[in-house]
Each structure stands twice: as structure tokens, then as C-alpha cells.
Amino acid sequence: MASEKRCSVRLLVFGASLREGSMNDRLASLASTVVAEKGGAVESATMKDFECPPYDLDVEQSTGLPAGAQALHDKLVATDGFVIASPEYNASMPGFLKNTIDWVSRFRPQPFNGKQAFLMAASPSMTGGKIGLWALRQPLEHLGARVYPDMFALAQAHHAFDDAGRIKDGKLQNWFETTIECFIDLVEAAKNYPHLKKQWVEFLGERPDKETTRVEMGETEKNRLSRGVGRRRRMQQFWRAYRREAHGGSRQRCPGRGPKLLRYSGHVRQRQERGASWTVSWPPAIGRDRCYEVRQ
Ligand SMILES: Cc1cc2nc3c(=O)[nH]c(=O)nc-3n(C[C@H](O)[C@H](O)[C@H](O)COP(=O)(O)O)c2cc1C
């Protein structure tokens, strides 16, 4: 089991419904259980913790950022990734969730940047709320979150849970667990193995200039490694994992955590040894007009 040797992974998990007895809260609670079973640590929350007034620049300038936004910001900073179970309202995400995301995006450094995310939905409908997740993916990717490619939508959610809070359909429960385990593997790899330095670029206009483009530098891998604290342990972890890959280690690999990532790391390392450094904007998937590759 992957959980035997897992390096520390801490995930924020919350349901994005304000309703008592919410199906999305039940799904979030099941996800928390699975994360813990797979060796991760869970920081639980509810959408009520993150409630904010409607976003208004005048309010922001006069009274600052609201307590709900501060609460989500603090939890994001304290965790390695987040899992949201969101209802779908009219083929999109709930307005209050988007509103909180907008408020939180005003913090600097902007806390969604570089965070791994997994999206889920529960709905009585046959689509399970999946269309709303595509809408939710958009602002999160815009803000630099690495949203996991697979998403989980629980259709006919009002009939889907058993008395123990698990999904009645055994195959679906199994698929849910496997997907979450793969996501944790990815978060673990992104956190603990040396990886490519990233830079978040938010492009707000037609022509990139100081007024329309906000650039926020992440921590460089070189800086991270040159900081004394934990350097030796990180390098040991890296080489141990590298050797395991090189000699065909027995541990099972999930998508996103495999030889490719490690070879990639080695490549970046070699470049850094030669004194070169490069940066890549994120997210790469949004489109050419919004995303640049920057080399220094
Ligand atoms: C205003 C409104 C719009 C909704 N639109 C959709 C929809 O487009 N697709 C869907 O699957 N469910 C839709 N629903 C049903 C919600 O997804 C459902 O109430 C939700 O999953 C309940 O989640 P909760 O139990 O976590 O509060 C809508 C519900 C409301 C109140």
C-alpha cells in the first residue's frame, strides 16, 4: 500500500453547500475518510467557514478582506492541496463559492497558485453536477491551481450513500478511492520531489505590459535546495526515489507520479548545475493568448 511509506501530505477538504444535511458535505466527509485511510492528513472545513459578502472593491479598500476569505486563505497556506465537493447550480458553480474565490484571489501571495486541487460534486441529477465542475475548474486554473484531470460526480446522490456513509455501488466506491489515492500520490510527488520552478502569470489585457500583467514569482528550486533546513532529507528522498525508478522499483505507480516526473526532475537539476534556470508560466492549458513561457 502506498500509505506505508508516504511522505507527509496535508489536504483541505470541504463541501461547498450552505445547506444543513448537504449531500456534498457527505461526499466531502467520505473523501476525508479515504484520504486518512490512504495515509494523508485532513483539514476539514465547511462552506459556512468561508462565507463572504458580495465582492466589492470599495468594501475591500475601506474595510479590507473579510474573515471568511481570510479563513480559506489560512487553510490553503497551511495545506498542500485541497478537495472541494460542490453542488451544481444551473450548469455552473454556486455563486457564493465563486464569490469567496474572488475575495481570496486578492491576497498576495495569491494562495491558490501552485496548489493541487481535486474537484467533486454530488447531485440528484443523472449528471451528478459534473458540468458545474468544469465551471469551477476555470477560475481555479486561472489562479494557478493544478486541478487534477479526473473529477468525480456522484449522480442520483440522494440514493447513493449507504448507512455508513460509503457509496452503495461497490465499483463506484472503489473507483472513488483509487482516484483519491492517485491524487494524493501526485500531491506527495509535487511536494517532496525536486521539480520545475514555476511562475504564475495573470494576463488581464490584450498587450502584456505592467498594467495588464501581474507576475508572481514562486520559490525557485535552487533557493529551496540552498536553504539549509531539510535540504539533506529532501535530496536523500529524491535520490532514493530516483534509484528506485532507475532499477525498476517494485512500488506501484499511479498517473502523475512516475519515472517521467523523476526524469524531468533530473533534467532540471542538470540545468541548474550548469548555472541555468528557467521558468514556465502556469496554467499552460488556458490558451496561447493567456500563457507565456518565460526563459531567463
Ligand atoms: C438554483 C438551483 C439550480 C440547480 N441546478 C442544477 C443543475 O444545473 N444541475 C444539477 O445537476 N443540479 C442542479 N440543482 C440541484 C443541486 O445540484 C442540488 O440541489 C445539489 O446537488 C444539492 O447539493 P447539497 O445537498 O450539497 O446542498 C440545482 C439546485 C438549485 C437550488
Image (spheres, helix red, strand yellow):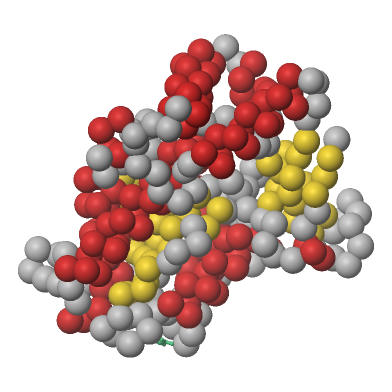
Res 42 → quadrant: top left
* Identity of the residue drawn at 33% across and 87% down: 126
* Identity of the residue drawn at 40% across and 56% down: 83
Q: Nearer the viewer, residue 102 or 117?
A: 117
Percent x, y of residue 228:
57, 12
Q: Is residue 14 left or right of residue 258?
A: left
Q: Is residue 15 left or right of residue 200?
A: left
Percent x, y of residue 149:
50, 62
Q: Residue furthest left?
A: 163
Evaluate whether residue 22 shows in this view. Answer: no
Rendered position, 194 above or below 236: below
Quarter of the picture holding the C terminus: top right
Percent x, y of residue 2:
30, 39
Q: Nearer the viewer, residue 45 or 67?
A: 45
Q: Is residue 43 left or right of residue 203?
A: left
Q: Residue furthest front?
A: 247
Res 265 → quadrant: top right
Ligand 1, by image quadrant, is bottom left
Q: How many numbered dots are placed on residues in this image?
A: 0
Rendered position, 210 above or below 136: above
* Identity of the residue drawn at 62% across and 37% down: 264
Percent x, y of residue 117:
47, 55
Evaluate whether residue 105 shows in this view. Answer: yes
* Identity of the residue drawn at 16% across and 64% down: 166
Quarter of the picture holding the N terminus: top left
Rendered position, 146 above or below 286: above
